[in-house]
Image (cartoon, rainbow, N blue to C red):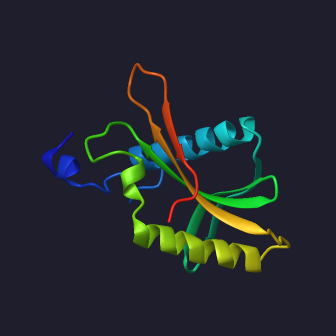
Amino acid sequence: MTETEAGSHDAGRTRPGGRRARLGAYGESYAAGYLVQRGMVLLDRNWRCEMGEIDLVLREGPVLVVCEVKTRSSTRFGSTIEAVDEQKAARLRRLAARWVATHDEHPPEIRIDVLGLLLEPGREPRVDHVRGVG
């Protein structure tokens, strides 16, 4: 890795198919399977509008769950869950309201979850699922 790549936190994000983009796509697929295996129903993935993107939209019983997935290969830049602050949670709430307004869904409750996935070489994936953030 070059010094420029090491110093650029967004190195893979700007290149479609870059290492970070592949890591994120794998993490979202893993997270979707993990949550479905635990009884949630997947309604949407990578839903976008002009306000941003929702990684996963699921239903758990009557509750609509908007899930932000954070995938890391190390904890060098902090934990996976630390990446979602109050500002990000507020944006996810606005996106959730927009998703509901554009779909034929009328949930009695909407919940924002964060699923952190740590993928360290040679180890089993570590999943941290935080329900009801922000």
Q: Is residue 62 above or below residue 18?
A: below
Residue 120 % position (x, y): 38, 29
69 displayed left or right of 46: left
Residue 98, given in percent of the width and then of the height, sits at 67, 78
Tell me the residue at 22%/49% (across/down).
5
Give the total of numbered labels: 0
Q: What residue occupies the far right of the structure in this picture?
A: 104
Residue at left 75%, top 80%?
Answer: 101
Q: Residue furthest left?
A: 3
28 left or right of 6 in image: right
Name, please, the residue furthest toward the top. Answer: 122
Q: Position of residue 20 (x, y in %)?
A: 41, 47
Residue at image location 65% in from the left, 37% down from the top: 34
What is the quadrant of the N terminus in the image?
Answer: top left
Q: Is residue 128 above or below residue 97?
A: above
Q: Quadrant of residue 19?
A: top left
Q: Residue at x 81, y 52 (%)?
A: 61
Q: Nearer the viewer, residue 125 or 26?
A: 125
The quadrant holding residue 74 is top left
Looking at the image, which is closer to me, 42 or 40?
Answer: 40
In the drawing, does residue 37 fall left or right of residue 96? right
- Quick one: 118 or 19, which is closer to the camera? 118
Residue 46 in the figure: left or right of residue 83: right
